[in-house]
Image (tube, grey):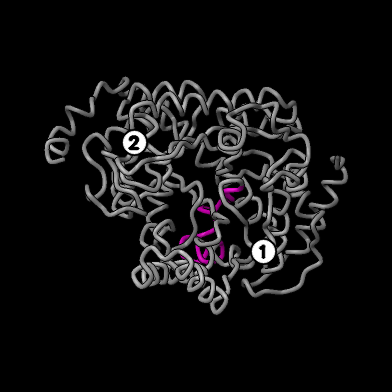
Amino acid sequence: MVSRAGVAICLAAFVSGFSGCAGRAHKATSVDRDDVMAVFAETPLIDGHNDVPWQYRERVSNDLDAIDIASDTSTLQPPMHTDLNRLRQGGVGAQFWSVYIPVDEEGGRPGDAAIVIDQIDLTHRLIDRYPDLELALSAKDIERIHRQGKIASLLGMEGGHSIENSLAVLRATYDLGARYMTVTHSSNIPWADSATDEPLIGGLTPFGVEVIREMNRLGMFVDLSHVSPDVMHQTLDITESPIIFSHSSARALCDHPRNVPDDVLLRLPETDGVVMVTFVQSYVSEELRVWYEDRQAERRRQREAHGENESAYDTAMAAWAEARPQPRATLAQVADHIDHIRDVVGIDYIGIGGDFDGIGQGPIGLEDVSTYPDLFLELANRGYTNAELKKIAGENLLRVMRKMEKASKRIQQERGPSGARFEVLDAEFIAED
């Protein structure tokens, strides 16, 4: 542990090293990894998205005894990105654990609510099992738990299909500790369009609007990662509370629909919010995104050419892969996304959402949860000040969380729980289906 005096000395040196820093040109500094860790000692590094709970479900059917995150999980096959030791090495002060469940082509199915509650229960049991972790339900909790030297642990639902078109289920998941919900996942749901599906609704249905309003009332972040641009804009039109993107990057640098367009970035100051820049390789590297797109097109061509002849198909695809080696995203490219968001809308709207253990492989230099300090060291070497690093690490998220909580208290004085029902509000959309 770093002593308070040691932290103060490190921070003083860190700040003085940046005094008078002009511009954002890449340049060498005297800052090292210990200086970055000192920043994380002062301000909790808050990561917006980690899929460890899904690893338990997929690998071991939620058997907590079968995976011990107090041990080195990089030795598992396939390796995991997260364990307690590496979280400590990475300086993580708070983590949103994703209580993800898959979405089908219909945007949900009966039983989704039971599965997401199962995942919430698993995550509670995981937090209770390890003294290094403690459940956090508020910004104040995050700060308190961080001061105590523990890792504040929050829950985020990934996909509105989890609530089975029910505001009662939404309220129940909030009561169980969920503090954000990603409106969609990879497919459309009956009341909102996904970024990675063909738009059917044109944004939000009337019930979708009511979900946003009820999340605002509860004090649950509306997470716009995974949603279509229409949903992004419509949510910004109606929300009474700050929003987040729990794991997205800048679309101007990588034209993946999961990323945030500049016209949306420019609207963040209207209600406040944070884009938690992700490490998903195909959302970071445009070269890799194009490679995946070209590979998919080549698969279609070779399938048409060879039909059910699997040997010929496999040979053709192997030859293509040899001629077109797969690119890798890099830590520097992640920093480029942070640069871009800062340049478009400002330093106050940036956070970090790695998506570790929800991805197969991180960018070069960001292979697991121990590597966050290396990203911040890169930013320091680009000229980011100590104050700016603290904002990206956690101050921005804490600010918008406090605003979200304040808005919730005000809204609860103005209106009670919504009794709106999907089958009534969206009767016209249901009839069209």
Q: Residues within 10 Å of mark 1 (few under 14, many from 20)?
A: some
320 and 411: which one is in front? 320
| Residue at image coords 18%, 31% | 425
| Residue at image coords 62%, 43% | 46
Task: Read off the residue under disc 1.
Answer: 364
Q: Position of residue 127 (x, y in %)?
A: 65, 27
Q: Which mark, by number, is residue 151?
A: none
Q: Position of residue 317 (x, y in %)?
A: 49, 71
In the rendered image, the quadrant that contains the N terminus is top right
Task: Read off the residue under disc 2.
Answer: 108
Front: mark 2 or 1: 2
Q: CA distance from mark 2 to mark 1?
A: 35 Å
Rendering quarter of residue 123: top right
Residue 144 in view (yes/no): yes
| Residue at image coords 56%, 44% | 48
In the depicted structure, whether residue 276 falls above or below residue 297:
above
Q: Earlier in the sequence, mark 2 or mark 1?
A: 2
Q: Position of residue 154 (x, y in %)?
A: 57, 33
In the depicted structure, whether residue 350 falls above or below residue 182:
below
> Which segment is the magenta one?
338-356
Left or right: 48 as drawn, with respect to 301: right
